[in-house]
Amino acid sequence: MAAITIAFEVDSSRLGSYTDEHLAQLWHIGQANPAPFGDAAACNFAELVGREVIRRWLAQVSPALWTHQASHVAAKTEWRA
């Protein structure tokens, strides 16, 4: 098999509209990008994709509501999530 080059064109302004599966693929593409370390475009793209992944994950996670309560000071109880 001969070597081939595969190029990806991604509209980073549309990251919010991509499916979770597509976004996961883009994360891998962003990390596997052969651009030199510190390349501005590569770094910015990877960060945008990562932030979208985190945004979606946080949207599905309930916040810890009762970790720190005033009554814990007096009772000196230890609570762990």
Image (cartoon, helix red, strand yellow):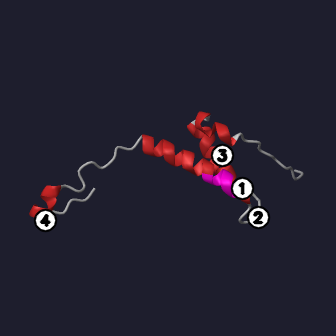
- From the image, tell me which residue sits under label 1: 42
Looking at the picture, which amino acid does disc 3 mark?
Answer: Leu
Q: Which of the 4 quarters of the picture holds residue 81?
A: bottom left
Which mark is drawn over residue 76?
4
- From the image, tell me which residue sits under label 3: 26
Residue depicted at 60% across the width and 45% down the height: 24
Task: From the viewer's side, name the closer residue of 11 and 5.
Answer: 11
Kindly state the secondary structure of the residue where label 4 is placed: loop
| Image location (x, y in percent) of residue 44 | 67, 54
- From the image, tell me which residue sits under label 2: 36
How far apart are the alpha carbons under marks 3 and 4? 47 Å
Looking at the picture, which amino acid does disc 1 mark?
Answer: Ala
Task: Give the vertical position of 19 relative to 44 (above or below).
Answer: above
Q: Farthest right residue?
A: 2
Q: Earlier in the sequence, mark 2 or mark 4?
A: 2
How far apart are the alpha carbons under marks 2 and 3? 18 Å
Image-based side of 68 in relation to 3, left or right: left
Which mark is drawn over residue 31?
none
